[in-house]
Image (spheres, helix red, strand yellow):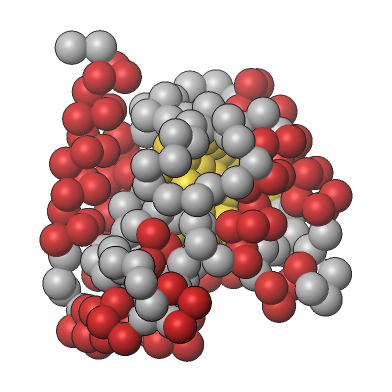
Amino acid sequence: MSRRASSSLTLARLAADVEACRACPRLVAWREEVARTRRRAHRDEIYWGRGVPGFGDPDARILLLGLAPGAHGANRTGRMFTGDASGVFLWPALHRAGLASRPESLGRDDGLDLRDAFVSNAARCAPPGNRPDPPELRRCARFLDRELAALGELRVVVALGAIAWDAALRALMRAGHALPRPRPRFGHCAELVLPGAPVLLGCYHPSQQNTRTGKLTAGMLDEVLARARSISRSAPAR
């Protein structure tokens, strides 16, 4: 079996485990309540209402890691960063960077492909207030560990926000990498290089709170993705 085929099979098994997970009662109750009640604009749709698996190229050298599925975004569509304002901002940037086949993501069966990129979240279920609790993040950490292990060509992790940055740091430590002291802090364009590990690159999250206020602009996101592509082409294999 080729490395790509092996990665694809491992990621497919992981996706099934994410979709079936019921480890966090608060999150399960919320995601299913939202799926039952629905938002008026989507009242005729069938919501996904389960854990949302990562999505992308099994040979990806770039992983974009966010916070959690949106209640009426990925919790509705079943695909990360699909169906909400964050995705409306992110997907055109991925397309401009040559990482996505289209500048928009409409749903799981829309034909969108990622090239050399994979998208995921620190938490796999939509949380109330878009804020997972620390124990919930810890329960979800096993899924990120498995993703990092499955993505055998991975060179760089783009952490979209401070929570994703912290989740990535913890994953690196669990994989046996020693962090420098003081602990590296999140910042836009911050970089952490550790021997034998993917480079960790920080970026503000493409939330409406950041994009509407200009804290994150299209140009800033383009700059981060260009840097990620540069790293992915030059960093050695793990």
The residue lying toward the viewer, choosing from 102 and 172, is: 102
Q: In this rendering, would 105 be left or right of 202? A: left
Q: Residue 229 at x, y = what percent?
A: 67, 30
Q: Residue 104 at x, y = what percent?
A: 60, 46
Q: Residue at x 73, y 36 (%)?
A: 96
Q: Which residue is drawn at 50% across and 42% down?
A: 63
Picture quarter with the N terminus: top left
Q: Residue 232 at x, y = what percent?
A: 61, 28
Q: In this rendering, would 17 be left or right of 62? A: left
Q: How many labels does the image show?
A: 0
Q: Residue at x 44, y 41 (%)?
A: 110
- Residue that lies at the very extreme toward the top in this rendered image: 2
Q: Which residue is drawn at 33% across and 44% down?
A: 147
Picture quarter with the C terminus: top left
Report if residue 65 is visible in the image.
Answer: yes
The residue lying toward the viewer, choosing from 171 and 2, is: 2
Q: Residue 170 at x, y = what percent?
A: 41, 60
Q: In this rendering, would 190 be left or right of 236? A: right
* Residue 127 in the image: above or below residue 140: below
The residue lying toward the viewer, choosing from 78 and 172, is: 78
The quadrant where residue 185 appears: bottom right
Report if residue 132 is visible in the image.
Answer: no
* Residue 162 in the image: above or below residue 10: below
